Amino acid sequence: DGGITQSPKYLFRKEGQNVTLSCEQNLNHDAMYWYRQDPGQGLRLIYYSQIVNDFQKGDIAEGYSVSREKKESFPLTVTSAQKNPTAFYLCASSIGGLGSYEQYFGPGTRLTVT
Amino acid sequence: QKEVEQNSGPLSVPEGAIASLNCTYSDRGSQSFFWYRQYSGKSPELIMSIYSNGDKEDGRFTAQLNKASQYVSLLIRDSQPSDSATYLCAVKISGGYNKLIFGAGTRLAVHP
């Protein structure tokens, strides 16, 4: 079964703690993305990676970090520097390259920080 | 700032009717457009993509694109209660990488 998996589905953390969200895909896609969704708002891009060992900041990268050591994996760390981390986090992937822009989403991780 | 605008709704339609969802975008150079369906508490699911002016049909769904007016729409024929969800419009911005800008979505409610 090809797809994108994210774990865990729900995550609870205390303020001041770093937390890492997992994203794995077996679609053989080159490009991967992290978005954040807040109630009533569109998806906002945090980081994206077009190829292994390369990634770029999106629109709201402050307080987040990523790595792309393997094609299949693109973990997101939410650091204590992120001022308002409670949100629904979505990982997506696409084939990459020109002409193939459809993005497919994982099931998401709902993070609550108190 | 490149933007995608959608009416937040809710758009309420009776079962069997046509639901019409609209989206406008600001980047005149955009060439690729997508519609996603998102059920409450779930992740977005791609339902349509459109690249050329005109209509594209897939089952009960029709996407319509008018680049001159910077307008894209989604029609859902024979609406069913299971179509009740939030529909997100996404636009690939012009430029060198595969970045999509998402609208905030329109909530559709189909009542029996």
Image (tube, helix red, strand yellow):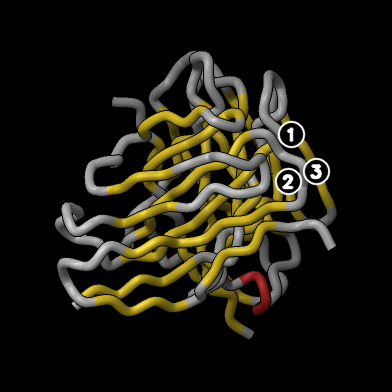
The residue wearing badge 2 is B62
Looking at the image, residue A84 lies above or below residue B74: below
Left or right, B24 with reference to A72: left
Numbered label attached to residue B55: 1
Q: Residues within 10 Å of mark 3 (few under 14, many from 20)?
A: few
Q: Residue furthest bottom?
A: B112
Tell me which residue sits at (27%, 62%) in the image.
A18
Q: Element type at marker 1? A: strand
Q: Are marks 1 and 2 on the same chain?
A: yes
Viewer-side residue, A18 vs B76: A18
Q: Amino acid at mark 1?
A: Asp
Q: Quadrant of the C terminus of chain A?
A: bottom left
Residue B25 in picture, x, y percent from top left: 43, 30
Residue A38 in picture, x, y percent from top left: 32, 61
Q: Are marks 2 and 3 in contact (CB under 8 Å)?
A: yes
Tell me which residue sits at (22%, 67%) in the image.
A17
Viewer-side residue, A78 vs A102: A78
Left or right, B9 with reference to B17: left
What's the distance in space between the residues labelled 2 and 3, CA to CA?
Answer: 4 Å
Left or right, B57 with reference to A45: right
Q: Are marks 1 and 2 in contact (CB under 8 Å)?
A: yes
Tell me which residue sits at (70%, 74%) in the image.
B80
Residue B81 in picture, x, y percent from top left: 65, 79
